[in-house]
Amino acid sequence: MDLTYPVIVAAAKTWFKVSAMDIHMTGAEHIPTEGGALVAVNHVSYVDYLMGGYPGAQRGRYIRFMAKKEIFDSPLGGPFMRSFGHLEVDREAGAASMRTAVDALRKGELVGIFPEATISQSFLIKELKSGAVRIAADAEVPLIPIVVWGTQRILAKGSRLDLSRHHRIDIEVGEPMHPTGADPAAETAELKRRMEEMLERCILASPPEERPAGAWWLPQQYGGSAPTIEEAAAQYAEERRRRAEAKAAKRKR
């Protein structure tokens, strides 16, 4: 029985209303009202769980997001995440994490995954992990792409929280894919292609004044000043190196 989820959904909708958030959503009808399905959401901010879950909430469904183990290990975050029925992902035990997701899907849950595995600091679609298509194929459920845009202006990686009013948020829910698992690389490439097209539609849906030249939250190819995919990848690699060094030093102590 869900106790936490309805409260948070109600609180989020109140926030949307009070802040006069300008939400533009298309394709919500692709979210099934019952039965298992895997939704693959792009990742540009720390509030993508809310916006990525919004289409499901509008269809009377709660999305059980896959999230990294470190969050579940937190004394505060762990109980909170479990209260939503979210699914723990241990990157060092990928097969077990996949089985957890497949089991939930076979039980009829709506499961959410961020196939980029981490926040895209370029705000474009990063290379996708093949886990999404493999999980959907194993569970024999549809794979539904969702793209959110504008959430990075609220709380992107490395930026301050911006709770100002009238933020425009675009959400597109794509047509379901039906992966077979016969060629995970090709099916992952198709998922990426679809998500890139959806992202471009979301970006260009806003009026020109919503896309000022040099804006930090806009990809360079659309006139902004966000890092390129290559620059963002280099930044992420450096972050991972520093984290690995910090872990090694901690173990030595």
Image (cartoon, rainbow, N blue to C red):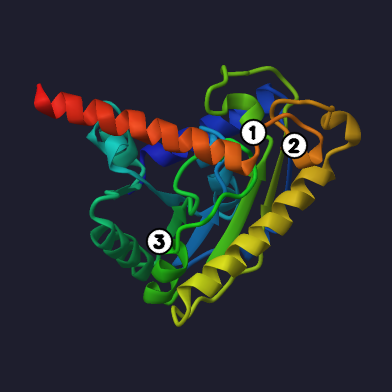
Q: Looking at the image, is mark 2 or mark 3 earlier in the sequence? A: 3
Say the numbered circle drawn on residue 109. 3
Q: Secondary structure at mark 2?
A: helix
Q: Looking at the image, is mark 1 or mark 2 earlier in the sequence? A: 2
Residue 25, image x, y percentages? 72, 48
The amino acid marked with disc number 1 is Pro
Verify CB contact (< 8 Å) between mark 2 and mark 3.
no
Residue 147, image x, y percentages? 64, 50
In the rendered view, tell whether residue 205 sits above or below residue 100. above
The amino acid marked with disc number 3 is Glu
Q: Residues within 10 Å of mark 1 (few under 14, many from 20)?
A: many
Residue 73, image x, y percentages? 23, 35
Report the front residue among 50 and 33.
50
Residue hosting label 1: 227
The amino acid marked with disc number 2 is Gln
Q: Classify residue 84 as left or right of residue 232.
A: left
Residue hosting label 2: 220
Verify CB contact (< 8 Å) between mark 1 and mark 2.
yes
Q: Residues within 10 Å of mark 2 (few under 14, many from 20)?
A: some
In the rendered view, tell whether residue 30 sits above or below residue 62. below
Verify CB contact (< 8 Å) between mark 1 and mark 3.
no
Residue at figure coordinates x 41%, y 62% from the top left: 131
